[in-house]
Structures are given as C-alpha cells and as structure tokens.
Image (spheres, rainbow, N blue to C red):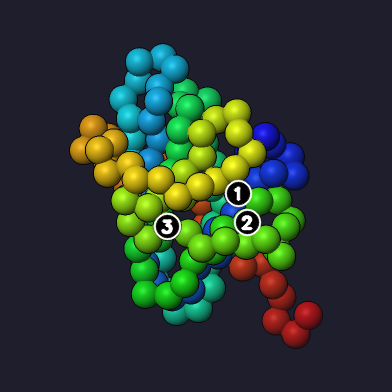
Amino acid sequence: MLFTTGNEVTVITVGPGKLSLASWGSINSGQSTVGAVTTTNAFLTKWLVSFSHCYTRFAFIWEGEGQAVYQIGNKADERKPVGRSWDNASTHHWGTNTIAGENITSVIPTCVNRDNMTTLYMIPDLSIDGA
C-alpha cells in the first residue's frame, strides 16, 4: 500500500514552478483541500508527497517550466511523468498500490485552498561540497 515504509511517493521536478496536492473523499465529513508549494530552483527539486488519514483520495500536479516525475519507494527505474493539469492529475485512491491519471476538475472547485499548508514537502539538498 502506498504511503507505507518502502512505498513512499516522491517527486523530482526541474526548474521553477509549483507542485499542487488535492485531498478529498473525507472519512469524517471534513472539507476537501487543495494546496500548492512553489519552488524557484533553477535545477532539481525533490519532494515528498504525504497524506492525511482524513481523506481517501489524493492527486498531485506539476505546474512548471521543466519536467516532473514521481516514483514509489526506491524504484527509480519506474519513474513516471507527473500530471500537468487537473484534467489528467496523478491520482491515488486509498487502499491501492497505484497512481494513475484521472480527471478531477470537478473536485477542485469544492476544495478549500491550503497553499503552503499542504502535505507536500521539499526535501533539502543535504549534499556536502566536495563529497
């Protein structure tokens, strides 16, 4: 199952842009949410996509100049493109092991905006110069 040890969802983006995450299908009558985190990095940005236990569906998209790919766990040889708009978002339904393209344009207007307050996290570059 995704979002468990060894099945983390990570995204790698190139160039400036924003990664957005929508969460819906509340299990406790909570409000659906959508939020974005922006990067101004000229090169690579690595992201961790997380989730809330309050929702059963999640989708993410990349709105940026360069490419974006996601991978599950350490399966770098299985990277796939991230959706570029809500009509073909990279979507996960809780309880499955997959991410698939899905049109969720009808969901977005029902979401509360959570820009910079969502469960998308930039992974800092921890490399050491010369190492």
Q: Give 24 or 95, whichever is nearer the viewer.
A: 95
**Horizontal and vertical percent position of residue 43:** 50, 78
Residue lying at 36% horizontally and 69% vertically, measured from the top left = 64
Q: Secondary structure at mark 1?
A: strand
Give coordinates of residue 123: x percent, y percent: 58, 58
Q: Residue 26: x and y, percent? A: 40, 22
The three-letter code of the residue at mark 1 reads: Val
Of badges 1 and 3, nearer the viewer stands 3
Sequence order check, earlier mark of 2 and 1 = 1
Which residue is label 2 attached to? Answer: 71
Q: Amino acid at mark 3?
A: Gly
Rendered residue at 59%/54% (across/down): 10
Q: Secondary structure at mark 2?
A: strand
The answer to whether residue 117 is seen in the rendering is: no
- Give the quadrant of the C terminus: bottom right
Q: Is residue 56 shown left or right of residue 48?
A: left
The circle on residue 83 is 3
Mark 3 crowdedness (10 Å alpha carbons): few <14, some 14-19, many ≥20: many
Residue name at image x 40 percent, y 50 percent? 89
Label 3 element class: loop
Identify whether 31 is placed above or below 2.
above
Side of 4 relative to 48 (left or right): right
Residues at marks 2 and 1, CA–CA distance in whole angstroms:
6 Å
Q: Is residue 24 visible?
A: yes
Does the CB distance between marks 2 and 1 fall below 8 Å?
A: yes
Q: Is residue 6 above or below residue 80?
A: above
Q: As shown in the figure, which amino acid type bears the numbered disc 2?
A: Gln
Between the C-alphas of marks 1 and 3, the distance is 14 Å
Identify the mark at residue 42; answer none if there is no mark.
Answer: none
Mark sitting on residue 9: 1
